[in-house]
């Protein structure tokens, strides 16, 4: 959770993926449940881009890998908001910036270049 202080340096942190959350679980709820295992650097709950509701999982990042391992052992199978949590080491890290996609106009230009000759050029049909 960053409150206007910019993004934390997540590369040096160890990330846990926490599954089976209710839609009403907040980052503060997770922080309170996990902070007894060590210092937490970030809590992130992905949200649906249209409804803005929780997608039912979160990432809790610890500064120390041993703290993350302790939290995984201590919280996996525990109840939070009436649900049994599933906690594991995260396999992938969050992307820092979404990959850039080509615009529709550049895609059309690329398609046009495959089958049409540019103005002033002749196509070889042999």
Image (cartoon, grey):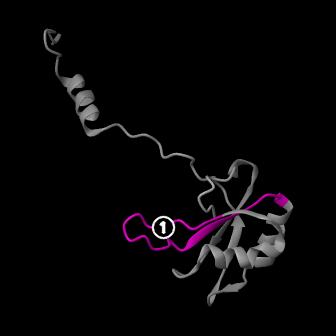
Of residues 120 and 48, which is closer to you in this image?
48
User: From the viewer's perspective, is 78 left or right of 97?
Assistant: right
Q: Secondary structure at mark 1?
A: loop
Q: Which quadrant does the N terminus fall into?
A: bottom right
Of residues 2 and 41, which is closer to you in this image?
2
Residue 76, position in %: x, y? 74, 77
Say above or below: 31 vs 113: below
Residue 108, position in %: x, y? 23, 33
Question: Which residue was labeled with disc 1?
Answer: 47
Residue sitting at the far right: 66
User: From the viewer's perspective, is 13 left or right of 94?
Assistant: right
Q: Is residue 124 magenta?
A: no
Q: Which quadrant does the C terminus fall into?
A: top left
Q: Label 1: few (<14), some or many (≥20) within 10 Å?
A: some
Identified at 63% across, 61% down, the residue is 2
Q: Quadrant of residue 50?
A: bottom left
Identified at 78% across, 73% down, the residue is 35
User: From the viewer's perspective, is 35 left or right of 53?
Assistant: right
């Amino acid at each position: 959770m960053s409150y206007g202080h910019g993004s934390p340096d997540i590369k040096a942190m160890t990330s846990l993926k926490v599954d089976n959350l209710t839609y009403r679980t907040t980052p503060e709820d997770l922080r309170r449940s996990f902070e007894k295992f060590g210092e937490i650097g970030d809590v992130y709950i992905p949200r649906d881009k249209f409804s803005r509701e929780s997608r039912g999982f979160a990432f809790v990042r610890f500064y120390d890998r041993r703290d993350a391992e302790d939290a995984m052992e201590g919280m996996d199978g525990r109840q939070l908001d009436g649900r049994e949590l599933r906690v594991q080491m995260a396999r992938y890290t969050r992307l820092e910036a979404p990959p850039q996609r080509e615009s529709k106009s550049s895609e059309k230009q690329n398609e046009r270049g495959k089958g049409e000759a540019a103005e002033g050029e002749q196509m070889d049909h042999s």
